[in-house]
Image (spheres, rainbow, N blue to C red):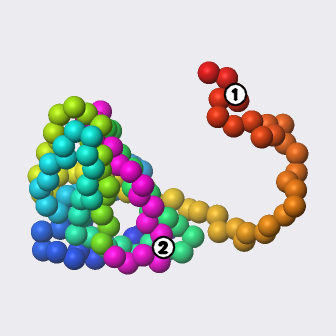
Amino acid sequence: MKEICIKLLDDRATLPTRAHPGDAGLDLYALESFTVEPGAGLRARTGAAMEIEPGWVGMIADRSSLASKGLKTAGGIIDAGYRGEVQVVLWNLSREPISMKAGDRIAQLLLIPVGLAAVRGVAELSDSSRGTGGFGSSGK
C-alpha cells in the first residue's frame, strides 16, 4: 500500500500524521475534548474517514505515552470497505480521570496486509507438535 486516502469530515479534524518518517503508526487526533473517568470507556471521534485498499486492514493501537498513564485502546479494526468516521474506543484503567483536548493525539493507526483465505469446514485437523495446548501450555 503506497498511500491511504483520508477525508476530513469536520473542519476541526486533523489529518493523521507520522511523528518521524520511519514510524509504523499514523497518529490519530481527537476531534473534541473529553474526559475518561476511572474504569470507564468512551468512543472518541477523529473526524476522519479513510479508504484502505483491499488486502489491507487498519488496526488502531495504543500510544505508549497514554498507555503508560492507563488510557488504553479497545477493539479497533478498520476493514478496507469501511468509509465512515474512524472512532477510537478508549478505556481508563487508572484510578484518576484522564482528560484529552481537541487536537491531542489519542491513538495510532497501523496499516497491515491481511491474508484473505477461503474458509473450508473439515471433520478433522492435521496433527501439530503443539496440538490442543492453549492458555499456559508453554509454561509460565
Residue extending farthest to the top is 140
Type of residue at label 2?
Ala
Q: Badge 1: how crowded within 10 Å, few (<14), some, or many (20+)? A: few
- From the viewer's perspective, tell me whether residue 56 is left or right of residue 83: right
Does the magenta segment cover residue 16? no
Magenta span: 68-84
Q: Residue at x 27, y 70 (%)?
A: 48
Pair 2/1: label in front = 1
Disc 1, SS: loop
Q: Main secondary structure of the magenta part?
A: loop
Q: Percent from the top left, x then y, of residue 4?
A: 39, 70
Q: Badge 2: how crowded within 10 Å, few (<14), some, or many (20+)? A: some
Residue 138's disc is: 1
Tell me the residue that label 2 is attached to: 80
Type of residue at label 1?
Ser
Given residues 68 and 26, the one toward you in this image is 68
Does the magenta segment cover residue 80? yes
- From the viewer's perspective, tell me whether residue 54 is left or right of residue 130: left
Which of the image's four quarters has the C terminus? top right
Inter-mark Cα distance, 2 to 1: 35 Å
Q: Residue at x 26, y 55 (%)?
A: 42
Residue 87 occupies which quadrant of the picture?
bottom left
